Amino acid sequence: MKMTVEFWGEKFEANIIIGAIGGFIIAVASSLGGFGGGPFVVPLMTVIMRLPIYVVVGSSLLAIFFNTLMASSRYYFYGQTDVVLFLIMAVGAVSAGFIGPRIAKRLSPIWVKRVAVIGLTYLGLKLLNILP
Amino acid sequence: MGLQRLKSAFTLLLSFLIILFINSTSFSQEKQGQPETKPAEVQKVEVKLDKEVYKGGDTVQISGKVSPGMKVNFVEITSTEAKVQVGRLDRKDFKFYLTKEIPAFYTIIINEDYVAKIDKNGTIEEKPVKEIYAKYKGNKKWRIGEFLKESNAEVAFITPPKMVSEIKVWKTSVLRSVIGSRGEPQPSLTDKKDIKRETARLLQARMRELAKLFVLGKITTKEDGTFTATFKLPENAPKGAFTVIAVVDKDVKSDPAKFRCDVSFPKYYFPVAGTSVNIFGPFILALAICTFGVIMGAGGGFILNPLLILIYKIPHQVVAGSVMPSVLFSQGAGIYNYSKIGFISWKLGIGVGIFMALGGFIGPLLNQYVTLDEYKFVFGIVLLILAALMLWQTTPGYIEKSKKEKAILEEFKRRAAAAKAQKGQ
């Protein structure tokens, strides 16, 4: 099933079924783990649904917001939200939103990503009990 | 005539009251006399602590007296005020158990020289508890029920079953989980034996490691019956009242001795997580990780969640439930900023978003069902996929492509802002 996405006078065809299934799977994993799904939803929409990046940046954020809002309220009603811990994390995250872009200007994004790859691989292997 | 009747009724009432009074006083006298008349039959255990209030990291000096010839084999320590919610999915019959009254901290100290006696169909087998402990410690899939029985520590498992008044039960299935339901509600556990057994399992689900629930320690009992033991409260011990019970065997144990654990700034007791942590620790961690997250273009949750679990040992259910909503603000702000310049396709965002909301309905339910090891496994896989995605984004082909796309993106943003400004005028 194709969905026509209109964006600034341009028309794009996107396979909404792939988008729905992909979005659903990403949302289950991300809400189970408790992280945002951004880095997965953007490639889903650009690489798999073949939409240009300028259509995706804002729209993917909107799609993820649905997941975050739903999962957060579910967690809250299940009694799994520690309000103080949440507030600490929220203040940290919002402050990071101001500090991050300022530091980012002085850094090469490619190198930041390379460092992140090493860090994420190490943490992933540690969680899988492959590394001590 | 009427007066006469009233008078007799009054005397009747008065005499009834007098009888009641005499009865009650004689009853209370009997009660008071009880310990004096029966000391020979009931073995008494006294237990004392060196202080009334401790802090996390302090050492609790436990001392007391038992009847000569006896030995204190176990000491049970429970946080009776700090309670947490714990759920557990039984994989055998697909039942989900949940209670909100599991002590946030619980430990049984077992005397390291204790020899457990197990009655095996009439023949009594003796086994040093050190051996049993070593055997269970090496086993990742240890079961608390089996350990309690084999080590005889069952006799000291006293307080938690008393604290738990209700354990809710659901009968679940894969199909039910897929639609995001906990399943068919079953009657809560009421049988004392059932509650005791399930409480032990929920405690294991909370504390996870054998070494946290059971400690081999020195409990020295001298010939005259005086005994001493020490116990170090962990740094992250919860706030509030604790009880200490010294146990000789099934029938001989002390009344609970009480103490309090104080938690003062900068340490803070997180009531849902059930642990006390220096409040600046998670804050600095969140700030640092999220800043790095913003720079690398992924949220902080990917790194933050495993670190909160690995460093602070906060249960994965609470980590997910507390970190997930913290990104709502930045996401909301982002959506607002993009929508101001008309940079969101609502059709695409809502179209995919509805299915993501469905996924977000199910994920938190599955989060309760998975054990810590399974959670780590899923998270580990997700991180490796993310690492692969990021690696791909550093390849020359991708960089070339993204440069072009970025230029288009900037061009569009500029146009969008200009159009907005024009509309505004």
Image (cartoon, rainbow, N blue to C red):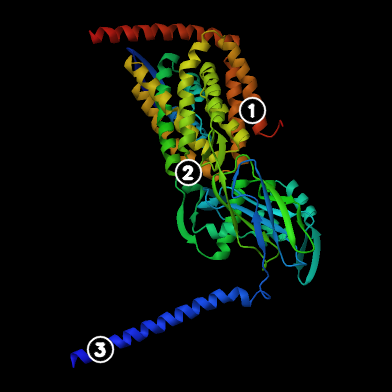
How many numbered tags mark residues here?
Answer: 3
The verdict on a common chain for dots 3 and 1 is no
Residue A23: give x, y in percent of width and height. Answer: 46, 30
Q: Position of residue B202 (x, y in %)?
A: 58, 52
Position in image of residue B305 (x %, y %): 56, 32
**Mark 2 surroundings: few (<14), some (14-19) or many (≥20) residues within 10 A:** some
Residue identified by numbered label 2: B178
Residue type marked 3: Lys
Q: Quadrant of the C terminus of chain B?
A: top left
Could you tell me residue B299's position as x and y percent?
A: 51, 24
Cα separation between marks 3 and 2: 76 Å
Outermost bottom residue: B1
Q: Is B130 positioned to the left or the right of B184 in the image?
A: right
Quarter-of-image position of residue A123:
top right
Proximity of marks 3 and 1: CB atoms separated by less than 8 Å: no
Secondary structure category for the residue under label 1? helix
Residue at image coords 60%, 59%: B256
Residue positioned 41% across, 36% down in the render: A70
In depth, the one of B9 and B253 nearer the eye is B9
For disc 3, the chain is B
Which quadrant holds the N terminus of chain B? bottom left
Report if the CB atoms under discs 3 and 2 are less than 8 Å apart: no
In the image, is residue B417 above or below residue B315?
above
Q: Which residue is mark 1?
A: A123
Q: Residues within 10 Å of mark 3 (few under 14, many from 20)?
A: few
Q: Let me know if marks 3 and 2 both belong to one chain.
A: yes
| Amino acid bearing label 1 | Leu
Q: Residues within 10 Å of mark 1 (few under 14, many from 20)?
A: many
Disc 1 and disc 2: Cα gap in Å?
29 Å
Which circle's residue, 3 or 2, is located before the other in the chain?
Answer: 3
